Image (cartoon, rainbow, N blue to C red):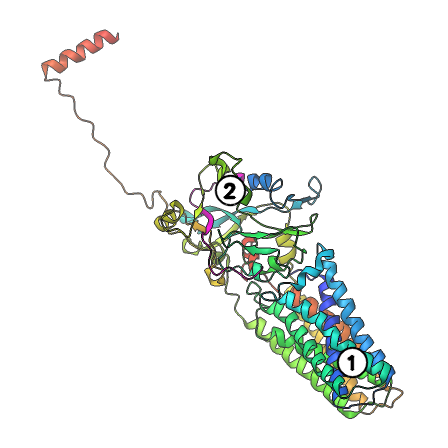
Amino acid sequence: MTTLPQSTDKKLGLVIDLDICVGCQACATSCKEWNTGGYSAPLSDIDPYGADPHGAWLNRVHSYEVGDGVSGHTVHFPRSCLHCETPACVTVCPTGASYKRAEDGIVLVNPDMCIGCKLCSWACPYGAREYDEHHGVMKKCTLCVDRIYNEHLAEVDRIPACVRACPTGARHFGDIGDPDSAVSKLVAERGGYDLMPEMGYKPVNKYLPPRARRDQTTAEVRPPVETPERTGKDTASSFFAWADKMLSS
Amino acid sequence: MHPAYSVIFFTTASGAGYGLLVWLAMASVFGGFPPDWALGLIGLGLALALITAGLLSSTAHLGRPERAWRAFSQWRSSWLSREGVLAIATYIPAAVLGISWVFYERFDGAVAIASVLLSILALATVYATGMIYASLPTIRAWHQPLTVPVYLTLAMATGGILFVFVLSLFTALPAWAITLALVAVVAAYVTKRFYWVAIDESPRSLRPENATGLGHLGTVRQLEPPHAQANFVMREMGFKVARKHAVKLRRLSAYLLFLIPIVCLLLLFIASMYTAPFFALVAVLAMGTGVVIERWLFFAEAEHVSMLYYGAEAA
């Protein structure tokens, strides 16, 4: 059913910290590795060793220059499905292959029902859906639905592959609908924001903005720490200093 | 947006086909001509052939055409699904009218009800086609109040020219047919003209700063794309026609789609029964070429908001 659930019990999603992402692509490659063998496999590549290699990936890491001069930043920007609360990619689907789960809010494509009309990719402002030319169906981030509930995996691995792979801890997974969850607290503390709220899709995933810079323009100048002067007037301490010197030599 | 030939052919051919159905059905209701079986066969046959060829062509761009039947299921939320349902539903009253007209040479009485229903369903199908595009907030050039009126008026104009052509093969053209076709073509021209003005004037208000949410830190420029080769999103959504070509193509499509057919229709007022099919055919050919260019531009001029992540300056 492509009509959306009135509300979802949970709002599972990702919180991505743009302050510490180093653009290493580990999340993107780990995503590709897991998902080419998991739900809706494979993630086909076209001409992988030729002149024009391309294929379906569910996570892409952009790098942007932001600002100019001393205040300029390089911001690495991972981009994947935001599992929106009101996603038009689901409602435009003519077959019911696209759906939003009422229990956790994950947006999925049923690869056995998709006809590959690509209209959902037109409806997504975030460019999050990628068509698989070989498979003939649309692919998108599944929030690793085949990991997060998978009791065959060790508990530490029951998180999306991208979160597990991130070497800097720039990616967080949790229930953004629960105000007491770790991710919700992080969003509140760091001013997490939605991408393009003006589109009205209500993304669940949040982005944490880069922190204010710490350099010569913003650092506060503190006086150097003073070392206490050795007086040597105390007889006992002089003795111990002498004994220490003798025993050390 | 990438202009897929199958979708261009589908929307133009089926648009003209549904337009022709409306013309034939309404003319039969108002008794515009006697129920000549040959006119019914050629007219309805041409309309249904255009629609059927268009529908079959539209499945050519699907990744899984064998599952196309599934597209009839989600009419509650999806305009694409509604279009499919309405397109198939239109065949039912079309078959009633066609059988009665061709085999029994009658289109009065209960058949007239089928004709009215046929007109409503045909227009509703074209409306749904327009809404597929107009309902997408991600594409500014399509998310316009005039997108659906353009689809409807162009269907009636292209269908009207076909109607005049088919009619000219059988009978001396009545003045009402030429006049109404002229009204349809002018209405389509006015609507399309205002549509072009609207998309040129509507602000490209979204920028990479909005897409990334980093505007408070300064201007946002692409430093490094995520991949060396264009991916699906860039191939599908990144197609863009050069501005100067777009201006030329708009002019060319306006000449072919509106100017030449209008001149031909005016000539039809004075043409003899023997020269009329020739002028009508010229109008058909010009309009056919013009509407294909118009539809190609409809896609090629449309910018998708997701390209902001890939270095587009605005959308």
Question: Is residue A213 on the magenta stretch?
Answer: no
Amino acid type of disc 1? Answer: Leu
- Which residue is under mark 1? B97
| Residue for point 82% across, 75% down | B45
- Quarter of the image with the C terminus of chain A is top left
> Crowding at label 2, few (<14), some or many (≥20) Cα neighbours within 10 Å?
few
Label count reads 2
Residue B189 visible to an observer of this rendering = yes
**Mark 1 secondary-structure assignment:** helix
Q: Quadrant of residue B281?
A: bottom right
The chain to which mark 1 is attached is B
- Same chain for mark 1 and mark 2? The answer is no
**Mark 2 secondary-structure assignment:** loop
Residue positioned most to the right:
B274
Give how far apart the Cα atoms at labels 1 and 2 are.
57 Å
| Residue for point 31% across, 43% down | A219
Q: Give the image location of residue A226, x and y in percent.
A: 20, 30
Q: Is residue A173 left or right of residue B14?
A: left
Residue positioned most to the front:
B110
Tag of residue A149: 2
Q: Which residues are magenta?
A: A1-26
Q: Nearer the viewer, residue B288 or B174?
A: B174
Amino acid type of disc 2? Answer: Tyr
Q: Quadrant of residue B19?
A: bottom right
Q: Give the image location of residue B245, x and y in percent.
A: 68, 66
- In the rendered view, would you say A236 is above or below B96? above
Residue A17 visible to an observer of this rendering = no
Tag of residue A205: none
Question: Is residue A11 on the magenta stretch?
Answer: yes
Q: Is residue B261 left or right of residue A190?
A: right
- In the rendered view, would you say A217 is above or below B70? above
- Quarter of the image with the N terminus of chain A is bottom right
